[in-house]
């Protein structure tokens, strides 16, 4: 059974940093590309970043490029999103997503609030 659990969200001031994590289980993590998405209040869910199974291929949305860093630890079945230079518009629930067996699986999300 695929299981994704995000953690690490919280309240941070503009310009600050935060790292969120996603612990995965129930599938072969080392064979799976992982994605981060976010959903702000009143907006559609948007893709943020993806990382290949080996970690060698990484893509970012233009809105976070140069500020966010996606990484993974295949020994711990965990994917991370390091968020720097945070802006109020980064406020959202952050979700990780895995494509396993022709299905999308999502975690429950972790709230990130950027406010002074």
Image: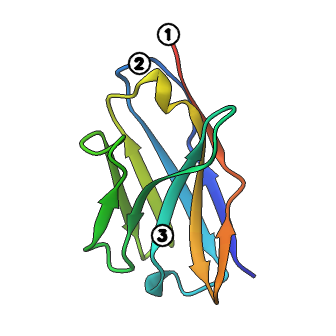
Write down the residue under mark 2: 14
Q: Position of residue 51 (x, y in %)?
A: 37, 68
Q: Which mark is residue 34?
A: 3
Residue sitting farthest toward the right: 1
Give the left or right position of residue 24, taking residue 61 as reference: right
- Please report contact status of discs 3 and 1: CB closer than 8 Å, yes or no: no
Quadrant housing residue 83? top left
Please indicate whether residue 42 sits to the left or right of residue 47 in the image: right
Between the residue at mark 3 and the residue at mark 1, the CA separation in whole angstroms equals 31 Å
- For the image, the number of numbered tags is 3
At 36% across and 75% down in the image, what residue appears? 52
In the rendered structure, which disc, 2 or 3, sits on the residue that comes first in sequence? 2
Left or right: 30 as drawn, with respect to 39: left
Instruction: State the residue at coordinates (37%, 24%).
Output: 16
> x%, y% of residue 27?
61, 85
The residue sitting at 30% across, 65% down in the picture is 58
Colour mode of the rendering: rainbow
Q: Position of residue 112 (x, y in %)?
A: 57, 34
């Amino acid at each position: 059974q695929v299981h994704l659990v995000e953690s690490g969200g919280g309240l941070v001031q503009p310009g600050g940093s935060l790292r969120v994590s996603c612990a995965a289980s129930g599938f072969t993590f080392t064979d799976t590309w992982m994605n981060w998405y976010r959903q702000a209040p009143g907006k559609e869910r948007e893709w943020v970043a993806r990382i290949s199974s080996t970690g060698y291929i990484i893509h970012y949305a233009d809105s976070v490029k140069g500020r966010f860093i996606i990484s993974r630890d295949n020994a711990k079945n965990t994917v991370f999103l390091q968020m720097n230079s945070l802006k109020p518009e980064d406020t959202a629930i952050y979700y990780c997503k895995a494509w396993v067996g022709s299905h999308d699986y999502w975690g429950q999300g972790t709230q990130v609030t950027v406010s002074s």
